[in-house]
Amino acid sequence: MGKVAVILKLMPESADVPIEELEKRVKETVSGIDEIRAEPIGFGLSALKVAAVIEDEEGATDALESKLAAVDGISTAQIVDVNRMI
């Protein structure tokens, strides 16, 4: 099989959680992260947009989403986009 590029949106538990600390935790928890960007939401709250390339296997995107949602300080993880790489 090939690979897929996955973009996820991670919401912190609160605006009090340092976004730089979340970025560090995400990188430590999941290998293969290509890019992480902070995206302002409002009222001092920022989300993290995470881009990763993973194997195109059944359940791989769900496993990645679950792994990221389990990171301390993350409230929710949501897949925003999935693209098959050529």
Image (cartoon, rainbow, N blue to C red):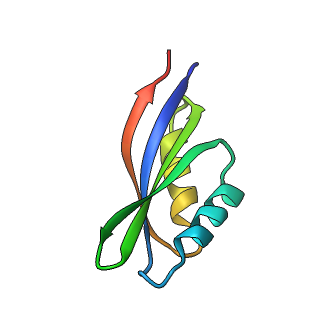
Pinpoint residue 23: horizontal percent, then vertical percent: 59, 62
Q: Which residue shows up at 29% across the image and 79% down it? A: 43
- Which image quarter holds the N terminus? top right
Within the image, what quadrant is residue 32 found in? top right
Total residue callouts: 0
Q: Residue furthest bottom?
A: 16
Left or right: where 61 falls relative to 71:
left
Q: Which residue shows up at 47% across the image and 39% down it? A: 6
Task: Name the residue nearer the viewer: 29 or 39.
Answer: 39
Pinpoint residue 34: horizontal percent, then vertical percent: 59, 41
Pinpoint residue 39: horizontal percent, then vertical percent: 39, 59
Residue 71 in view here: no
Q: Which residue shows up at 35% across the image and 78% down it? A: 44
Vertical side of 5 occupied by 41: above or below: below
Q: Residue furthest left?
A: 42
Residue 80 in view here: yes
Task: Name the residue nearer the viewer: 3 or 45.
Answer: 45
Left or right: where 54 falls relative to 11:
right
Vertical side of 7 occupied by 72: above or below: below
Q: Which residue shows up at 30% across the image and 67% down it? A: 41
Vertical side of 75 occupied by 62: above or below: above
Pinpoint residue 84: horizontal percent, then vertical percent: 45, 24
Q: Residue furthest top?
A: 86
